[in-house]
Amino acid sequence: MMEELFRGALSDRIMELIQRNVREMIDAQTGSIRPLVVYAVGSQKYIEMKNVVTEKILAKLPETMKHMESYAEDAMDVRNTLVERMQRLSPEEFEGMLRPAFKEDEWSLIAVGAALGFLVGELQVTFMLH
């Protein structure tokens, strides 16, 4: 889940959201002395400092989030939710969900089934005639 969050198709949106929140948090933490800090270091340097802090946080985030993954799974109860919802599926819905997973191997399953059916049929004929 965390892997998808940080490297998935929409990970750029997540990173953008994190960057914006980190910058806002830095501004909030400097609070009423922010104008003094900006005056002391310069506005460009203040922006650069926020960018450096944001980059360091983003670099450490995937490693940090690995420690939270088990907690998040427990908190959201992903396993039981999946089991419960899959049990509610009708046979047709369940088949529709599984079929894409087996679609590329479908021809081999059919071929093996045909071969086994032929073999059982031949054995049955052999035993009946002898």
Image (cartoon, rainbow, N blue to C red):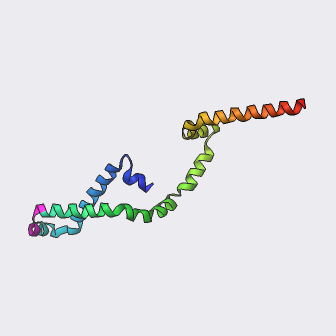
- Relative to residue 45, is residue 54 drawn left or right? right
Relative depth, front residue between 51 and 35: 51
Is 1 located above or below residue 123 in the figure? below
Image coordinates of residue 116 in percent, x first then y, are: 72, 35
Q: Toward which corner of the image does residue 123 lie, by quadrant?
A: top right
Is 31 located above or below residue 105 in the figure? below
Q: Is residue 42 rendered magenta in the image?
A: yes
- Relative to residue 36, is residue 109 drawn left or right? right
Q: Residue furthest right?
A: 130
**Quadrant housing the N terminus:** bottom left
- Relative to residue 127, is residue 85 drawn left or right? left
Magenta-highlighted residues: 39-44
Q: Residue at x 57, y 39 (%)?
A: 102
Relative depth, front residue between 72 and 129: 129
Image coordinates of residue 10 in percent, x first then y, are: 36, 47
**Quadrant housing the C terminus:** top right
Q: Residue at x 59, y 35 (%)?
A: 106
Q: Is residue 43 rendered magenta in the image?
A: yes
Q: Toward which corner of the image does residue 90 lie, by quadrant?
A: top right
Is 110 located above or below residue 30 in the figure? above
Query: Total number of numbered labels?
Result: 0
Image coordinates of residue 12 in percent, x first then y, are: 32, 49
Q: Residue at x 74, y 33 (%)?
A: 117
Q: Toward which corner of the image does residue 80 lie, by quadrant?
A: bottom right
User: Magenta segment, principal secondary structure?
Assistant: helix
Image coordinates of residue 8 in percent, x first then y, are: 39, 49
Q: Residue at x 30, y 63 (%)?
A: 57
